[in-house]
Amino acid sequence: MRCFAFWVALFPALPLCAQVQDESPAPVRTYNLLRENDDWSFLADPSQQSDVWDPIKYIPLRCEACYVSLGGEIREAFEQVGNDNWGKQPYSNAFLLQRYMLHSDWHLGGTFRVFIQLKSGLEDFRAGGARPIDEKRLDFEAVFLEVGNTRKKNWAVLRVGRQELDYGSGRLVSVREGPNVRQSFDGAKIRSKVGAWNVDAWAVRPDLDKPGFFDNAPDHTTAFWGVYAARPLRRGVGYDLYYLGLDRKNATFERAARRLSFGTRSLPGCGGQLPRSSRGPTLIMKALCSSEPSAPTIFGHGRSRRILATA
């Protein structure tokens, strides 16, 4: 009788235990600063598709392990600058900056990948006209072919074409996220993972942004190459080693037009990611600045309001 009572008491708890064991943590949906680093392959499982954007994040193609992912970004910024140019312009300059970006990421089996990203930067109302970093009607921010398999424990892939570079805190190598028009490079890069280390090596030329339509071209007077190795120690903490080389034909440093840099970096990192809600559709991700005036200096002072929409 005691045994019967025990099983009667235990029976209602069995479905609950089974449910807890079957539940697994939801996949993390993130928007990376470099959208080429977004990984939506987990959406191959239809049970994981719960967000309104999931149907365009994983569009299966007619081959094994083939799919395309679509996305984009809209950034609106209002800038106000006073006493610019060391106080030589004693007036307030206010203007509107708009950035539009659209990308498609084609995974063709486990070996080939094509990534295409368009950019458009527009400027209105600025006294003196748009600066080179403010306006770019329409062009490719990235268009590259990647060959290799990143699903192994240790791997290496080759990337050729126009691409973005961003390493560390972005002080030395950056996509130039602050200005309206981001920086891109033309050339080749090898990405690899060896044990706990992620190692990239590249040889590129920076693109010269022109204000028109599809008229950007690489700067043939500047060559940029380097190796960057990063090793995560624990969550949010990493250790980096790097070697950078820069050769400018039309510039002279102290003794030559070539500069080599070696360095190391160890600190907590922010990851360069925007979290994406898994509970429902998310479009307006983050207010980057909220009308906070900068401290007055001899360079002038400014105010910025920015809104970023990402999908």
Image (cartoon, grey):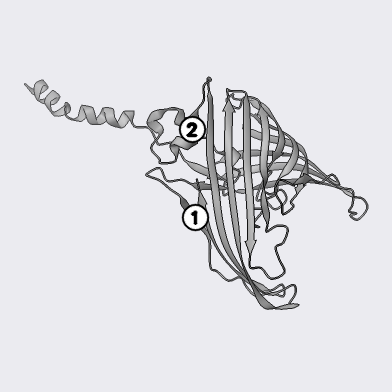
The residue drawn where x is 46% and y is 45% is 276
Disc number lying in front (1 or 2): 2
Q: Is residue 270 above or below residue 27?
A: below
**Mark 1 → mark 2, Cα distance in angstroms:** 24 Å
Q: Is residue 17 above or below residue 281?
A: above
The residue drawn where x is 69% and y is 71% is 127
Residue 235 seen anywhere in this rendered image of the structure: no
Depth check: give the residue in front, 216 or 10.
216
**In the rendered image, which quarter contains the N terminus?**
top left
Of label 1 and label 2, which has the lower sequence position?
2
Instruction: Name the spot of residue 290 as percent of width and height, x first.
Output: 52, 65
Residue 171 seen anywhere in this rendered image of the structure: yes
Q: Which residue is mark 1?
A: 286
The residue drawn where x is 68% and y is 78% is 91
Depth check: give the residue in front, 181 or 202.
181
Instruction: Name the spot of residue 284 as percent of width and height, x first.
Output: 46, 53
Q: Quadrant of residue 87?
A: bottom right
The residue drawn where x is 70% and y is 48% is 213
Q: Secondary structure at mark 2?
A: loop
What's the amino acid at mark 1? Lys
Mark number for residue 135? none
Q: Which residue is mark 2?
A: 58
Going by the picture, which residue comes out furthest to the bottom?
90
What's the amino acid at mark 2? Tyr
Q: Is residue 212 above or below residue 195?
A: below
Instruction: Name the spot of residue 281 as percent of width and height, x first.
Output: 40, 46
**Seen in the image, is 210 located left or right of residue 194?**
right
Q: Quadrant of residue 306?
A: bottom right
Depth check: give the residue in front, 46 or 276.
46
Within 10 angstroms of label 1, few (less than 14), some, or many (20 or more) residues? few
